[in-house]
């Protein structure tokens, strides 16, 4: 009899956003006359930039001719995209990254989940709390998290680093030394971003303890403050202790076309073993790259037109974020975030739990958000609203929320 990976059975219930989708579907079915506005899932709503569309059309035409047809992409990704990434994401910020340290993939979520393949099962992981649930879920599937406690909503072998109002939603160095440290900055869901001094402390800590940092920079395009680094490699010594994951989803709207990349420095080693070489082997054997057409679209993001157009899209979402935050504060909510990210992080009113507020908002204002508890125990009593909606729906949603307070 074949056997299954029993670690999957340890996962408590469905994925956060699957639960939300089920609740919303049930509500819409029972209330077909209601206009439901979603400020929940972090999916973009603006169309791809014209420069990206032009590149897609051109690449499709190339695939129609034998002379320009492309089959399998190179294991690391096409050099034209990796060279653009090298120049515009790193070199322009004074960071030296070689092209063979850049691995093109079909998205940051895939890389976040797949990264565990190259690490031993007995590694202790540490995560910010609250944070993007994929980090923990992927390690549950890999058998690294121990047992789940329903009362505390924590895993026995996971080091949780609370990000609360008391510490400014920035994690503190843990007492128990982890082997793998997940840092998302700007953070999803709190929207908080680490300053360079704060991030440098983590780099120094990781190098001292022999830990590796998996740094999720998916929201770096939304950073507005000068003392917030866009890459962990802006910190001294980061190339010997950190892996960085990037996405085209949030900065260029590729949620439906899927493109991302991971940087694994050649200086990063474990007992003399090159992590870069391991990831290259994993990348080549279990291919999770992106097609030629999509990589050409990614290249267009770095063109003069593409950079200007995608910058406008980021500005559009950040204006939505400003509208949400100012509207919520005017209505009397305690809210943070949305300075270096497209997320507003608010305290639930009247002692409501995160899911109680979800139901309240859906039923009384027909608005969908994301319960903070779904991102970790410290997210209880908080709620995330995304700025990725349309301007019209964002304005409508804010007015509906304000009306609840009257």
Image (cartoon, rainbow, N blue to C red):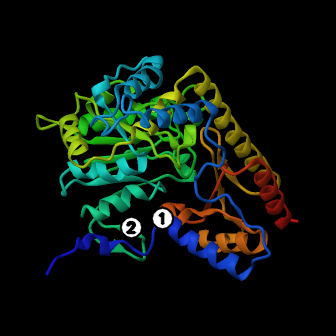
Q: Is 110 or 358 nearer to us in this picture?
A: 110
Side (left or right) of 104 relative to 331: left
Vertical side of 247 occupied by 267: above or below:
above
2 and 1 marks in contact (CB < 8 Å): yes
For label 2, the SS is strand
Kindly identify the residue that appears in the image at 29 percent across and 71 percent down. Answer: 147
Q: Which residue is mark 2?
A: 154
Q: Looking at the image, which residue sits at the far front?
A: 66
Q: Is residue 9 visible?
A: yes
Q: Residue at x 56, y 46 (%)?
A: 168
Mark nearer the N terminus (2 vs 1): 2
Percent across and percent down for residue 42 are 58, 53
Q: Where is 17 relative to 307, above or below? A: below
In x, y percent, where is residue 52?
56, 33
Q: Tally the numbered discs.
A: 2
Mark sitting on residue 284: none
- For disc 2, the neighbor class at 10 Å (few under 14, some 14 to 19, many from 20) is some
Provide the residue designation for mark 1. 377
């Amino acid at each position: 009899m074949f056997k299954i990976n029993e670690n999957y059975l340890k996962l408590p219930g469905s994925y956060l956003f699957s639960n939300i989708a089920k609740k919303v579907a049930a509500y819409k079915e029972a209330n077909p006359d209601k206009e439901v506005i979603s400020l929940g899932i972090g999916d973009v709503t603006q169309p791809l930039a014209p420069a990206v569309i032009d590149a897609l059309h051109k690449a499709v035409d190339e695939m129609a001719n034998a002379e320009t047809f492309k089959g399998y992409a190179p294991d690391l990704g096409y050099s034209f995209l990796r060279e653009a990434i090298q120049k515009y994401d790193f070199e322009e910020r004074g960071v030296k990254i070689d092209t063979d340290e850049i691995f093109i993939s079909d998205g940051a979520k895939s890389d976040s989940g797949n990264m565990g393949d190259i690490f031993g099962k007995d590694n202790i992981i540490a995560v910010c709390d609250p944070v993007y649930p994929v980090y923990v879920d992927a390690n549950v599937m890999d058998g690294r998290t121990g047992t789940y406690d329903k009362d505390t909503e924590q895993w026995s072998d996971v080091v949780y680093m609370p990000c609360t109002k008391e510490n400014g939603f920035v994690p503190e160095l843990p007492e128990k030394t982890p082997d793998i440290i997940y840092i998302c900055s700007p953070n999803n869901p709190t929207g908080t971003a680490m300053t360079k001094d704060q991030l440098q402390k983590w780099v120094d800590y990781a190098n001292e303890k022999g830990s590796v940092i998996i740094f999720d920079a998916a929201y770096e395009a939304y950073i507005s403050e000068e003392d917030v680094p866009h890459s962990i490699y802006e910190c001294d010594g980061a190339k010997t202790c950190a892996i960085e994951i990037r996405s085209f989803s949030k900065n260029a709207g590729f949620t439906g076309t899927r493109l991302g990349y991971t940087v694994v420095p050649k200086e990063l080693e474990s007992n003399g073993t090159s992590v870069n070489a391991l990831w290259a082997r994993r990348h080549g054997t279990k291919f999770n790259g992106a097609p030629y057409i999509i990589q050409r679209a990614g290249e267009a993001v770095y063109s003069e037109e593409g950079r200007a157009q995608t910058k406008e899209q980021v500005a559009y979402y950040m204006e939505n974020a400003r509208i949400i935050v100012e509207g919520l504060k005017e209505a009397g909510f305690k809210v943070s975030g949305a300075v270096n990210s497209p997320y507003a992080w608010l305290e639930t009113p009247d002692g409501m739990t995160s899911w109680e507020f979800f139901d309240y908002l859906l039923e009384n204002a027909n608005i969908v958000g994301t319960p903070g508890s779904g991102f970790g125990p410290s997210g209880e009593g908080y709620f995330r609203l995304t700025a990725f909606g349309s301007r019209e729906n964002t304005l409508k949603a804010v007015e509906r929320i304000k009306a609840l307070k009257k």
